[in-house]
Amino acid sequence: MTKALDGVRILDFTHVQSGPTCTQLLAWFGADVIKVERPGEGDATRKQLVDVPGADSLYFTMLNHNKRSITLNTKNDKGKEVLERLVKSCDVLVENFAPGALDRMGFTWERIQELNPRMIMASVKGFGPGPYEDCKVYENVAQCAGGSASTTGFLDGPPLVTGAQIGDSGTGLNLALGIMAALFQREKTGRGQKVLAPMQDGVLNLCRVKLRDQQRLEKGPLKEYSQYGEGIPFGEATPRAGNDSGGGQPGRILKCKGWESDPNAYTYFITQAPAWKKICDVIGKPEWKEDPEYATPPARLNKLSEIFATIEAWTMTKTKFEVMEICNPLDIPVGPILSMKEIAEDMSLRETGTIVEVDHPERGKYLSVGCPIKMSDSPVEVTRSPLLGEHTSEILADVLGYSAEEIAELKEIGATEAVKKLAAE
Ligand code: CAO
């Protein structure tokens, strides 16, 4: 079967996490992704958090599936010449270098347009234009600058970062979407364009409900926040709200059977207004259904801690999965807190390709996340990440049309493997 992006060629100049997430998605949709790496070292993540000595790390392998790797020193003349030819042969250049790095290499947007007017140049940067545009940025910096950290955590504790990589992988998704739209527009205009996805913007976009609350706060207290019911005054900025749900329906994380020894024996429980009567029956409080002190959402606001303590007394008698089995058919929204171990062992996620087992020549079998987007006419087959420079000779010959002699001359740009291979032929 064909793939959605068959025939699209990506010059992948990305490293670490944000950029590689984007190009991995494009590869899963069928694009030919050519990852350009520095000879001898490659993407720094290859050797970060190493768990199998000598093998590429899980950090690298889980972000670079379905790509080809060419090693190229793009700071010498020969390397620049190869890069120019790659720019002419590809549809999209994706990069997430520190601001200005590509310009210093001699590949300004103007130069890229001269070489290939159809080229789409897509970048992740920490910040958009403004006071911080020159900063190097990592995940947690973006979470802090995008409003996530100040609104995550408990009221009486410090700001918290979240384990979900919303700055890196989240921005990679935004960039992929921008590239898709630019490819679509190019069909009509014949021109490429610049696509920029700043990490701060990506995080803020995911935190929009907190910006919503910032503006509501100017009109009065945020009544659905637990602190309102507890009589704690609000300050000037959207506060940290613990595990309150962001949607206006009160919710908390509650203990379940086994919580004393299992750190993940918890459930999320939402007292969704339409399900209130069923909740009262389930937890053994039928009298709350008609009691005016409990029957309506506004009446419950100043009693949420008492109400959730009563619900928790019930959830503690059940496992998190039993809570799910009982509440789901009644349309009471609950969700078990799943550990990474439980997720890794969940066979239904393997069946849908959400988790995949991949074989790698250096490290053997490992688990990875598969494509989170499923398309009926563009199935995803996850293949292993490339070894450093594994496809150098193949790309120089097949994509750029270099002869064996020319490839031999490129020795100093890091095409050592290609030279060795061709010399042996
Ligand atoms: N050949 C020769 N030189 C190469 C090369 C190649 N194939 N590939 C990269 N380089 C060079 C770059 O040109 C740059 O050189 P100069 O500094 O002399 O211009 C150098 O390698 C280092 O690039 P860098 O500054 O991007 O890398 P870093 O490790 O210092 O910074 C990071 C990493 C992520 C902080 C920075 O790239 C950045 O801010 N990127 C944008 C935001 C981003 O994506 N952050 C998410 C990262 S994941 O948490």
Image (cartoon, rainbow, N blue to C red):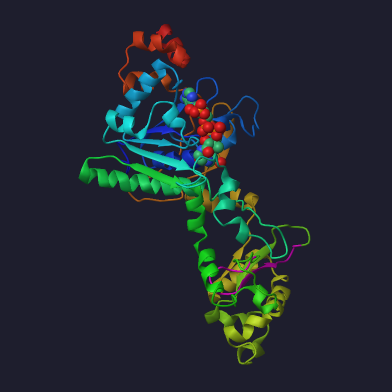
Query: Is 141 drawn above or below residue 121 in the view shown?
Result: below
| Residue 363 locus on image (x, y percent) | 59, 30
Task: Say above or below: 319 vs 286.
Answer: above
In the image: residue 305, left or right of residue 44: right
Instruction: Please tell me which residue lies in front, 91 or 265.
Output: 91
Q: Check if residue 97 falls in the magenta segment.
A: no
Residue that sits furthest to the right in the current view: 260
Query: Where's residue 138, x and y in %?
Result: 57, 42
Q: Quick check: is 245 in the magenta stretch?
A: yes
Residue at position x 63%, y 57% from top? 338
Q: Position of residue 165 (x, y in %)?
A: 56, 48
Instruction: Work out which quarter of the rendered image holds the N terminus and state it.
Output: top left
Q: Nearer the viewer, residue 357 or 115?
A: 115
Residue positioned 57% across, 78% down in the render: 220
Q: Is residue 212 left or right of residue 307?
A: left
Task: Give the number of marks.
Answer: 0
Q: Residue at x 52, y 64 (%)?
A: 211
Position of the C terminus by quadrant: top left
> Is residue 26 visible in the rendered structure shown here?
yes
Q: Position of residue 270 (x, y in %)?
A: 59, 72
| Magenta stretch prevailing secondary structure | loop
Q: Is residue 232 above or below residue 352?
A: below
In the picture, measured across the screen, residue 293 lies left or right of residue 3, that is right
Residue 87 falls in image quadrant: top left
Residue 357 appearing in the image: no
Judge whether 287 appears above or below 385 on screen. below
Magenta range? 243-259
Indicate left or right for 224 with 23 as reference: right
